[in-house]
């Protein structure tokens, strides 16, 4: 049975396991065990609500799955239940499948917001170029209108940000977007989308600003005194 | 060994063909051998702007397909010594040639001419890819409009990705009266976004409309301000350091002098 017979999906609340009804439970368990083992230390310390769907499991099978997850993942499994439908999304969240710039790497939240892998791009990001990275991104240059920067973590632009930026593209809202001249066409942090105010402010000098998501809204602040 | 320069923009209608015609004519007026290559296959215009359309027998597709020799397709402009045109085909389209063939053609042309100017079609697809294939240098033409600058930015990104480094910027159809009113992007804003070296600024000028329609490039017209701008640009391409034209003076020097005399006279 191949790896893709069981799909793990990260959600805002935890983990969803998608099964196929025609598969044998023993095979399913084996695949899940392999997937969790290959994830290594990834799950360790996480607190997960686990849902599953796609196949009906008996209470006994549920118990075995639960035990497998608890013993092999290192995460604290708060619950395991059958999820009948998709966990209701908050109003502004874009469905992940329709996301135009899909990060292909992992479905799980990037945990390196404070310390983590970072891509440094030297030079201007021009219209039509896409910089996409499963981590933090630092652009040493401008991001021109029409240019797109997508990061699983923070985005720092050491120049003018006039294009489209998407920080925390995988759902974690703790990321920030910082620029020396923050005038984006569109700014997204996780599932929150916002854009620059309509009055075009003419600026002769750089005013470094940071965009953070707080209480479901995006705030722009000057972080230097 | 000649220089192969592609004149491109992304956006259509900003003045690539006009620029190619004028710079080419300008360079030939300075005594060098120039060949203009029209790669806009299917929508050829360079021949019309140069006034050479009724002398076309063979075109670039014929040369590449081997139906004729390169010398048979090149049209010598009788007005300007050293100026030649390789026209595009009108009955085919841009899939008729590929980048490798273009590169071979440019290599052949650069043996014979001091400058090979390639008029690139609008867009970023096959036509563009063909046109930049043999080029070492590029001139990016834009007008001071947000959409044109956006497309120019994309083109610069694509040029850099295709190893055509340090493109130069030509801002065309500038209307200084509108720039002063704030209704048109000013030159510094454009350079701020595009971040490449400025080759020159050409004002919006009625004489260009006239000259393209009659097939006489404006660069040869001493009364045309745009022609003067192109003359300066030509000299810059050939290495001279020429200061930017002052586009703000609406009145020519002669008019100001006349005014002075008429006041004193009466």
Image: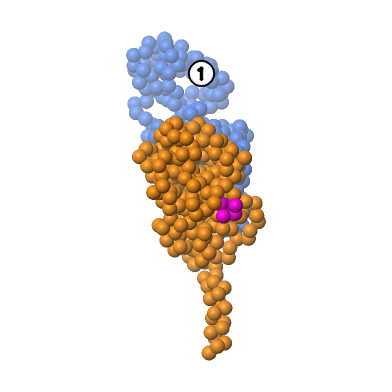
Chain colours: A blue, B orange
Location of residue B56 with respect to B180 vertically, above or below: above
* Residue B251 location (% of width, % of height): 53, 73
Residue A52 within the segment the image draws in magenta: no
Magenta span: B27-31
Location of residue B119 with respect to A26 vertically, above or below: below
Residue B29 within the segment the image draws in magenta: yes
The residue at 47%/35% (across/down) is B69
The residue at 42%/61% (across/down) is B210
Tally the numbered discs. 1
Chain at tag 1: A
Location of residue A111 with respect to B193 vertically, above or below: above
> Which structural element holds mark 1?
helix
- Left or right? Give the position of B256 relative to A59: right
* Residue A194 location (% of width, % of height): 46, 47
SS assignment for the magenta stretch, majority: helix
- In front of the other: A108 or B87: B87
Q: How dense is the environment of label 1, judged by Cα within 10 Å: few (below 14), some, or many (20 and up)? A: some
From where the camera sits, is residue B166 visible? yes
- In front of the other: A122 or A52: A122
The residue at 53%/16% (across/down) is A37
Location of residue B143 with respect to A110 vertically, above or below: below
Residue carrying label 1: A36
* Residue B100 location (% of width, % of height): 50, 31
* Residue B222 location (% of width, % of height): 53, 64
Q: Residue B107 occupies which quadrant of the picture?
A: top right
Image quarter (top left, top right, bottom left or bottom right) of the N terminus of chain B: top right
The residue at 60%/60% (across/down) is B244
From where the camera sits, is residue A157 visible? no
């Amino acid at each position: 049975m191949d790896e893709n017979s069981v799909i793990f999906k990260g959600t805002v609340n935890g983990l969803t396991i998608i099964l196929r009804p025609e598969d044998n439970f023993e095979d399913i368990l084996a695949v899940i065990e392999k997937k969790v083992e290959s994830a290594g230390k990834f799950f360790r310390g996480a607190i997960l609500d686990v849902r599953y769907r796609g196949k009906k499991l008996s209470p006994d099978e549920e118990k075995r799955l639960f035990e497998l997850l608890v013993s092999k993942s290192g995460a604290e499994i708060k619950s395991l239940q059958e999820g009948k439908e998709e966990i209701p999304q908050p109003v502004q969240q874009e469905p992940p499948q329709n996301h135009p710039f899909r990060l292909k790497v992992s479905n799980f939240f990037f945990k390196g917001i404070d310390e983590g892998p970072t891509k440094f791009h030297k030079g201007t990001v021009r219209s039509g170029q896409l910089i996409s990275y499963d981590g933090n991104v630092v652009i040493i240059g401008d991001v021109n209108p029409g240019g797109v920067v997508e990061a699983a973590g923070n985005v720092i632009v050491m120049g003018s940000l006039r294009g489209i930026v998407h920080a925390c593209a995988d759902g974690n809202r703790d990321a920030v977007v910082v620029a020396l001249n923050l005038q984006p066409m569109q700014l997204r942090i996780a599932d929150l989308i916002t854009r620059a105010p309509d009055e075009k402010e003419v600026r002769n000098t750089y005013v470094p600003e940071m965009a953070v998501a707080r209480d479901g809204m995006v705030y722009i602040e000057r972080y230097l005194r | 060994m000649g220089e192969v320069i592609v004149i491109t923009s992304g956006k259509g209608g900003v003045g690539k063909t006009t620029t190619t015609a004028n710079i080419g004519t300008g360079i030939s007026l300075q005594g060098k051998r120039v060949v203009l290559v029209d790669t806009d296959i299917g929508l050829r215009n360079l021949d019309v702007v140069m006034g050479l359309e009724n002398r076309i027998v063979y075109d670039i597709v014929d040369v590449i397909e081997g139906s004729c020799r390169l010398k048979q397709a090149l049209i010598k402009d009788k007005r300007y010594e050293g100026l030649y045109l390789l026209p595009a085909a009108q009955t085919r389209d841009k899939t008729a040639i590929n980048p490798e063939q273009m590169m071979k053609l440019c290599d052949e042309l650069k043996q014979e001419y001091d400058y090979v100017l390639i008029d690139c079609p609008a867009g970023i697809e096959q036509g563009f890819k063909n046109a930049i294939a043999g080029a070492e240098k590029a001139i990016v033409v834009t007008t001071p409009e947000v959409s044109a600058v956006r497309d120019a930015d994309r083109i610069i990104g694509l040029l850099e990705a295709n190893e055509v480094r340090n493109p130069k910027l030509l801002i065309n159809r500038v209307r200084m009266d509108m720039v002063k009113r704030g209704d048109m992007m000013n030159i510094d804003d454009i350079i701020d976004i595009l971040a490449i070296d400025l080759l020159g600024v050409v004002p919006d000028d009625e004489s260009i409309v006239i000259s393209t329609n009659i097939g006489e490039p404006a660069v040869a017209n001493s009364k045309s301000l745009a022609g003067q701008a192109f003359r300066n640009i030509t000299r810059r391409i050939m290495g001279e350091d020429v200061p930017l034209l002052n586009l703000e003076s609406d009145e020519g020097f002669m008019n100001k002098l006349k005014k002075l005399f008429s006041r004193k006279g009466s």
